[in-house]
Image (cartoon, rainbow, N blue to C red):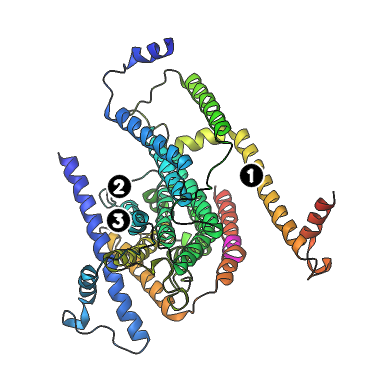
Amino acid sequence: MTLAALAADTHGFLSPTGVEIAFLLVGLVTLGAALITVTTRQLVHAALWLVVALGGLAVEYLLLTAEFIAWVQVLIYVGSVVVLLLFGLMLTRAPIGRSPDADSGNRWVALGVAVVAAAALVWVVVDAFRTTWIDLDGAPSGSTDVTGQALFQNWVLPFEALSVLLLAALVGAIVLSRKAKADAAPATGGPADRGPGAAGADKEGAR
Amino acid sequence: MNDALDVTLRLLVVFVVFLTFPLLIGQTEHKVMAHMQGRLGPMYAGGFHGWAQLVADGVKFAQKEDVVPAGADRRIFQLAPAVALLPYLLVLLAIPIGPEEGAVGEVIDAGVFFVLAVMGVGVLGALMAGWASANKFSLLGGLRTAAQLLAYELPMLLAAASVAMAAGTVSLPGILNAFEWWWLPWQIVGAIVFFVAGLAELQRPPFDMPVADSEIIFGAYTEYTGLRFALFLLAEYAGIVVLCGLTTVLFLGGWHGPWGADGLGWVWTLLKTAVLAFIVIWLRVTYPRLREDQLQKLSWTLLVPLALAQIALTGIVKVVIE
């Protein structure tokens, strides 16, 4: 625990500031919401608790002065991913009340994977930042300006690689949906009125 | 002390605006719709041209019984109106109405992202209401709401991104500080895309398929009565205020006016917002409801490509002038 001692050297743990206390409390709420998300037997409630967990994360980003990341978190995860999730649930099955079959035989394996993933993340973050403290009174370190500069000067390559990955996922999704359509269509329409994309998907299916 | 007073005062003003402007737009809608349809609208409540009609409506809503259906998911059913309404209050905080230091509730560094993110959260309220009501019409309404949001969020974001590119900042006052009059023709396509997508996100006619009263009986709100129903209505009108205010700030130059801009900036902002609100009402009276497939087609095959073209144009012009 030399690391903890090092961190305690500069600021100390015994007189936390208001921001630190808030950070801890919001973290606890986020953790609780995440636990309920995976344990509740009510499907739609799980999705709504996920909103609380993701919103809590956004607040944590705000407390860490990463304002831009916080709003993007809300925009993408709360505004789009959860809406998509709810849409999927409502479209398939979303009974009010408990679903007795909302359980998985893999729960212990899942718990193991979750613990390992959490341990790896905590280790990486602790090792990367060690005793760094954010100076709240100094120049902003997480504003849009700073984030943009860092992203497009130091981290351009990972950024571009990620965008290519997303593009591949996008194309893959289109191919998959077209293939499903092509499989259902043969009875009604000939290959002539399907278009080049569907023909490509047919080839994929033949392989 | 002075700082605390200042913040309290701003929050109070934003709150008062949040409570009164939606009512003003509601009353205007009563009157404008009536006159466009060759009738008078409310004439009795309050005496002069029925100005107090919405106050009377509010009293009526408050008196009604607050019913929760037996099969409903009680807590989520009751929480939904608050989730639908509060985001618009938060967005109002970030909209600047004048160039002065104190003319905005709270300066937010990533303002464009903030307003779009928080507006998206409001839709969760309608989804929660649609699911928790235990009513098939409500569930259909919720489904349509979700499908509509997914389709129209993208063009709205892209159109806003175009302005942010043009200004080189994502802060709302920053965008207005960088505004020049020729942005109006330059960004006009983005403005139209943004406004139309915003209308769809608010589920205003002609994009009111999710609440279509004549086929799915107000969709997600079917089971709501009394004050909670009134809160949903208030959310709709607050949404109009927010959308018109945002379009004004992002695309129409906010406090900039052709003349007399000194000290009169807030008048220009309010005037532009009011004209846009009138257009929102006008569209409701003019156009029939779009069918679900037409809704999706309009977004994916027209608005998204237009928004992408606008971004390309913005990029080219930006590079050329630099």
Instruction: State which region is magenta.
Output: B302-306
Q: Residues within 10 Å of mark 1 (few under 14, many from 20)?
A: few
Q: Main secondary structure of the magenta part?
A: helix
Determine whether A39 is above or below B234 in the image.
Answer: above
Q: Residues at badges 3 and 1 in contact (C-beta under 8 Å)?
A: no
| Residue B107 position in % (x across, y down) | 33, 46
Taking the spot 34% from the left edge, 57% from the top edge, the residue there is B74
Q: Residues within 10 Å of mark 2 (few under 14, many from 20)?
A: some
Q: Is residue A94 left or right of residue B133?
A: right
In front of the other: label 3 or label 1? Answer: 1
Report if residue A154 is visible in the image.
no
Q: Nearer the viewer, residue B17 or A78?
A: A78
Q: Is residue A191 left or right of residue A181?
A: right
Q: Residues within 10 Å of mark 3 (few under 14, many from 20)?
A: many
Q: Say what amino acid the circle numbered 2 marks.
A: Glu
Which chain hosts label 3?
B
Q: Say what amino acid the circle numbered 1 marks.
A: Leu
Q: Which label is found at residue B106? A: 2
In terms of sequence position, does the residue under pointer 3 or pointer 2 come before the other?
3
Tell me the CA gap for discs 3 and 1: 40 Å
Residue identified by numbered label 3: B98
Determine whether A152 is above or below A187 in the image.
Answer: above
Residue identified by numbered label 1: A166
Q: Say what amino acid the circle numbered 3 marks.
A: Gly
| Residue B67 position in % (x across, y down) | 30, 66
Which chain hosts label 2?
B
Q: Secondary structure at mark 3?
A: loop
Tell me the CA gap for discs 1 and 2: 35 Å
Q: Secondary structure at mark 1?
A: helix
Q: Secondary structure at mark 2?
A: loop
Q: Nearer the viewer, residue B70 or B134?
A: B70
